[in-house]
Image (cartoon, coloured by chain):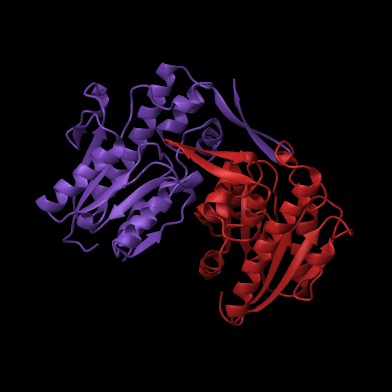
Chain colours: A red, B purple
Amino acid sequence: MTESDKLDIIIPFKWKSAKSRLSNMMNLEEREEFALKMFQDVLNTIISFKRQSLNDIKISVLTTTNDVPDCIKDERFRVIVDTRRLNDALNELISVKSIEDNSHLLILMSDLPLVNTKIIQEILNREEDLIIVPGRKGGTNMLFIKNRSKFRVDYYGISFKNHEKIAIENGLSYHLYDSLFAGTDIDEEEDLLDLLVFGEGEAKKYLERLGFVAVSKGEKIFLDRQ
Amino acid sequence: MTESDKLDIIIPFKWKSAKSRLSNMMNLEEREEFALKMFQDVLNTIISFKRQSLNDIKISVLTTTNDVPDCIKDERFRVIVDTRRLNDALNELISVKSIEDNSHLLILMSDLPLVNTKIIQEILNREEDLIIVPGRKGGTNMLFIKNRSKFRVDYYGISFKNHEKIAIENGLSYHLYDSLFAGTDIDEEEDLLDLLVFGEGEAKKYLERLGFVAVSKGEKIFLDRQ
């Protein structure tokens, strides 16, 4: 990306009844608060990045409900409400945008509290048409799309493979960006350990306030709640 | 590392009763075979790397038992048997070596079947005194040590933090190398999914021969055995 390129950053964010796979660890209120803290960590990283960048960057939060919490209403980004499934909502944004202007598009998930500005910068510096950041178990945690008109997202299943395939079918060069921190999306009990061990932001502090700790015993590290 | 530097690569390998945390998924024989396949993947990567490198590279496998399987007896590397705990065995190797010669030392675990030569090269190209490759849950999957006399390993607990601390205490510069593929050590059921999804080598093929598959259902990916 050169300095004159425009960049749209989209953060899909689910708040209501979020993180259901943590139901055995946290009640509904805790899960929604936790999802919000992770979103805030991602947003803080993006805002820090924007501050140090020379590019014209626009930040959008994509959500399925009008009932967004007050704290995510912020003049630094716009909120797009779309009640459809993620793929449909994002593919409309991709296609509309590719007519409207020729900005590049970075899509990153809101449950990546370990992402940092160095990772964002490295991804944006790459030369390929498409950068895919795979997450654990084959998901896609971030996508950087330079040729919107030739791309569409397909987030379900082992989605990093879907995105590789779509790139190949459309003649796009692509790169798999290898990062433990960007590859760690927090969905399940085991992921909380990674956040406790590697985290530094609000989401980690919130876990600690809830009493979660990483306990080491010999070679094994496990999660406990006090 | 410059072309004239010598490099010792040490792969600690546990074979007998390996991977006990997979006991609910595989029987003893399968676990030992699986550990061996992962070791072979790591070794293949190291041997490919050595072939393309200009450095003088010596490969050693550190194991706790004399009863090593025939297939790991190979003229391309030496086998060091040390019955003590990993820290003690490695720290002796580090200190003896630091008197013997001034080669650099790369320690990588044998359960990293997703490691590739590009990762090895990037780690060896770094400028810092010490490169730590953290693994999931805070372990240390690889260490690249340039100042052996000022370093010792401490693998138990959240060991990447131990290694950061030892570096700081000894005035060594260090870098955390961020990689999902090098950060994924295969210990537990959930890790098998990562190997199935991202793997390409012998360990992945062995899992498939055992009938393990990654099944996707909506947003969720889970492990099944057929």
Q: What percent of the width, then of the height, locates residue B80?
A: 19, 34
What is the count of numbered marks? Answer: 0
Residue at 24%, 48% in the rendered image: B51
Q: Which of A43 and A195 is in front in this view?
A: A195
Most extreme residue toward the right, as rendered? A66
Residue at 26%, 54% in the rendered image: B151
Most extreme residue toward the left, as rendered? B100
Q: Quadrant of residue A56?
A: bottom right
Q: What percent of the width, then of the height, locates residue A54?
A: 59, 82
Q: Can residue A127 be seen in this view?
A: no
B174 relative position to A165: left or right: left
Q: Indicate whether B25 appears above or below A211.
A: above
Q: What percent of the width, then of the height, locates residue A125?
A: 52, 70
Q: Which of A103 and B207 is in front in this view?
A: B207
Q: Indicate whether A116 appears above or below B159.
A: below
Most extreme residue toward the front, as rendered? A226
Q: In which quarter of the image is residue A200?
A: bottom right
A42 relative position to B203: left or right: right
Q: What percent of the width, then of the height, locates residue A146?
A: 62, 67
Quadrant in which the C terminus of chain B is drawn: top right
Q: Which of A65 and A208 is in front in this view?
A: A208
Quadrant in which the N terminus of chain B is drawn: bottom left
Q: Is residue B26 visible?
A: yes
Q: Nearer the viewer, residue A28 or A8?
A: A28
Q: In which quarter of the image is residue B40?
A: top left
B175 relative position to A73: left or right: left
